[in-house]
Image: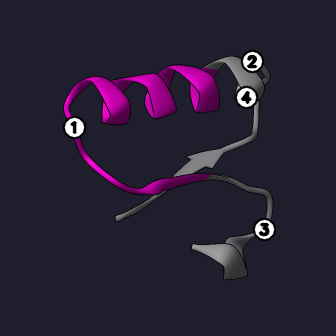
């Protein structure tokens, strides 16, 4: 699974970190990435 955090308004690192922790606590594998440009979606 790949989850993109859209970095528009701030606190991007905190959102990426909490999403990674959520995946881990659910026992799910995946990657969380910072989406900066429309083409990255």
Q: Label 3 neighbourhood size at 10 Å, few (<14), some (14-19), many (20+)?
A: few
Which residue is tagged 2? 11
Distance from Cα at disc 1 to Cα at disc 2: 25 Å
Apparent side of residue 38 relative to residue 24 in the rendered image (left or right): right
Span of residues in magenta: 15-32
Distance from Cα at disc 2 to Cα at disc 3: 17 Å
**Rendered image: mark on residue 37:** 3
Give percent across and percent down for residue 5. Answer: 59, 45
Q: Are marks 4 and 3 in contact (CB under 8 Å)?
A: no
The residue lying at 79 percent from left, 58 percent from top is 36
Which residue is tagged 1? 27
Distance from Cα at disc 3 to Cα at disc 1: 29 Å
Q: Are marks 4 and 2 in contact (CB under 8 Å)?
A: yes
Q: Secondary structure at mark 3?
A: loop
Which residue is tagged 4? 12
Point out the residue furthest to the left here. 26
Distance from Cα at disc 1 to Cα at disc 4: 23 Å
Mark 2 / mark 3, whichever is N-terminal: 2
The residue lying at 69 percent from left, 72 percent from top is 38
Mark 1 / mark 2, whichever is N-terminal: 2
Decide: is 38 above or below 39: above
Distance from Cα at disc 4 to Cα at disc 2: 4 Å
Q: Nearer the viewer, residue 6 or 20?
A: 20
The residue lying at 61 percent from left, 25 percent from top is 17
The tally of labels here is 4
Q: Quadrant of residue 2?
A: bottom left
Q: Label 2 neighbourhood size at 10 Å, few (<14), some (14-19), many (20+)?
A: few
């Amino acid at each position: 699974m790949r989850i993109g955090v859209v970095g528009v308004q701030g606190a991007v690192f905190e959102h990426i970190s909490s999403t990674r922790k959520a995946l881990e606590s659910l026992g799910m594998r995946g990657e969380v990435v910072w989406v900066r440009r429309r083409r990255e979606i």
